[in-house]
Image (spheres, rainbow, N blue to C red):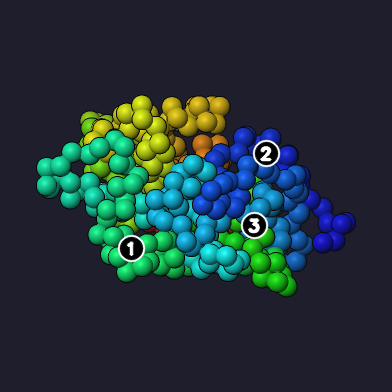
């Protein structure tokens, strides 16, 4: 790239937004080993050409490469091995390679593990069976779909991965296309070599929002523009099984945990399944789907704090009058993918804004970070709420 182009060092961005939260994708993972995490020193160097849209001056080449070797799983891994690899690497999803090759055939996501565990828990409860602590992860192998695949000689993750396409982009392609993909349901995408097409690095929703956060300060649109309502929630005293059943059944990535007065006290998401899987290897763990959701998540926060060296806030909130960039700043600081919109004096949340919603919106903004139709929509929302 043109060495005379003006850039903003990642270290400067890092100082503005704080330490990097956990990542959703990193190094390669095979059956037997994982390469230690690492990050490279990178610069964010946006281009100068624009197509008149807010993201029009950016290409995929402007996305920093955070790791030397992207994490991938091999297609001949069993579901138990693969889900354990995700949990141990503290990531939500990973591209899957055809065994013995570099060909990417799809994605493995913890959303699948959540569905399997919920199905098995419901079946066990119906049959009045008790759950063995040591069977938490290996239990997945007993799921009817997994057993049927194994009986058919397909007891690995190949078919499962193919159900979730892994989208890739070349460095020369518009960054807006990555935003569209992340706003359409993909939680990770890949950047591939311009000529060979080989995977160079992985971009997650968390990585891209941290990169764009300083640029989003010029956006004046209110958070109501992208807010979704009503809020999907569970009560703090509901079991973790009930919370994950809602997440799985509604095919969502997270929900609000409410106290007895209807106030948001926690955030439960697909990434919290990692704790349940990780606990399988710990004979002393008290983690269980039978725990109250609030207790389950409280335990998770303590584990995160020990791994990351700092405590994580239980939930991210913003006011209905806040600007979108203010909500983004809070999401970056907390590392969450959801922020709950609240009103002064009202405990029950008005709505929720997710990273998916934000990435879906960004490509539609003009050069000044505005959109007349969305602005009008936000005004009608405000009137309806008042």
- Give percent across and percent down for residue 212: 63, 50
Please identify the residue farthest to the left as the structure is shown: 127
**Going from the N terminus, do you reach mark 1 or mark 2 first?**
2
User: 144 or 352, which is in the foreground?
Assistant: 144
Image quadrant where residue 19 sits: top right
- Give percent across and percent down for residue 12: 73, 39
Q: How far separated are the C-alphas under marks 2 and 3?
A: 20 Å
Is 114 left, or right, of 271 in this rendering? left
Is 365 left, or right, of 78 in this rendering? right
**Going from the N terminus, do you reach mark 3 or mark 1 first?**
1
Q: Mark 1 or mark 2: which is in front?
A: 1
User: 337 or 190, which is in the foreground?
Assistant: 190
Image quadrant where residue 176 sits: bottom right
Which residue has dot 2 on it?
A: 14
Q: How far separated are the C-alphas under marks 1 and 2?
A: 46 Å
**Few, some or many residues within 10 Å of mark 2 (<14, 14–19, 20+):** few
Q: From where the camera sits, is residue 160 visible?
A: yes
- Give percent across and percent down for residue 56: 66, 65
**Going from the N terminus, do you reach mark 2 or mark 3 first?**
2
Is 325 left, or right, of 83 in this rendering? right
Which residue has dot 3 on it?
A: 201
Mark 1 element type: helix
Q: How far separated are the C-alphas under marks 3 and 1?
A: 32 Å
User: 29 or 306, which is in the foreground?
Assistant: 29
Residue displayed at 27% across by 53% down = 142
Figure quadrant of the N terminus: bottom right
Which residue has dot 1 on it?
A: 150
Q: In this picture, is 238 found above or below 219?
A: above
Please identify the residue farthest to the bottom as the structure is shown: 195
**Few, some or many residues within 10 Å of mark 3 (<14, 14–19, 20+):** many
């Amino acid at each position: 790239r043109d060495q005379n182009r003006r850039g903003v060092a990642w270290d400067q961005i890092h100082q503005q937004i704080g330490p990097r939260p956990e990542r959703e994708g990193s190094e390669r993972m095979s059956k037997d080993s994982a390469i230690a995490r690492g990050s490279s020193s990178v610069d964010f160097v946006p281009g100068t050409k624009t197509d008149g849209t807010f993201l029009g001056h950016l290409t995929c080449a402007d996305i920093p490469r955070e790791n030397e070797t992207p994490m991938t799983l091999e297609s001949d891994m069993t579901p138990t091995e693969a889900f354990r690899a995700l949990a141990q690497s503290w990531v939500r999803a990973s591209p899957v390679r055809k065994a013995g090759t570099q060909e990417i055939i799809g994605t493995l996501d913890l959303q699948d593990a959540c569905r399997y565990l919920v199905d098995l828990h419901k079946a066990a409860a119906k049959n009045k069976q008790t759950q063995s602590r040591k069977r938490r992860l290996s239990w997945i192998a007993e799921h009817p779909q997994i057993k049927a695949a194994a009986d058919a000689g397909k007891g690995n993750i190949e078919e499962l991965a193919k159900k979730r396409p892994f989208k890739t982009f070349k460095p020369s392609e518009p960054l807006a296309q990555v935003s569209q993909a992340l706003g359409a349901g993909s939680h990770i995408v890949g950047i591939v070599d311009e000529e060979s097409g080989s995977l160079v690095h992985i971009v997650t929703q968390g990585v891209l929002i941290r990169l764009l956060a300083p640029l989003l300060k010029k956006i004046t649109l209110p958070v109501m523009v992208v807010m979704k309502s009503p809020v999907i929630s569970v009560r703090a005293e509901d079991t973790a099984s009930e919370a994950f059943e809602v997440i799985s059944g509604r095919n969502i990535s997270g929900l609000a945990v409410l106290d007895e007065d209807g106030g948001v006290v926690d955030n439960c998401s697909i990434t919290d399944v990692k704790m349940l899987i990780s606990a399988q290897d710990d004979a002393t763990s008290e983690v269980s789907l039978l725990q109250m959701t609030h207790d389950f998540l409280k335990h998770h926060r303590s584990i995160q704090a020990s791994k990351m060296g700092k405590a994580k806030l239980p939930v991210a909130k913003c006011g209905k009058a806040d600007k979108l960039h203010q909500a983004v700043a809070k999401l970056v600081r907390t590392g969450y993918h959801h922020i709950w919109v609240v009103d002064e004096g009202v405990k029950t949340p008005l709505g929720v804004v997710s990273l998916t919603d934000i990435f879906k919106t960004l490509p539609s903004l003009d050069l000044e970070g505005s959109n007349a139709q969305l602005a009008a929509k936000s005004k009608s929302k405000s009137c309806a709420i008042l």
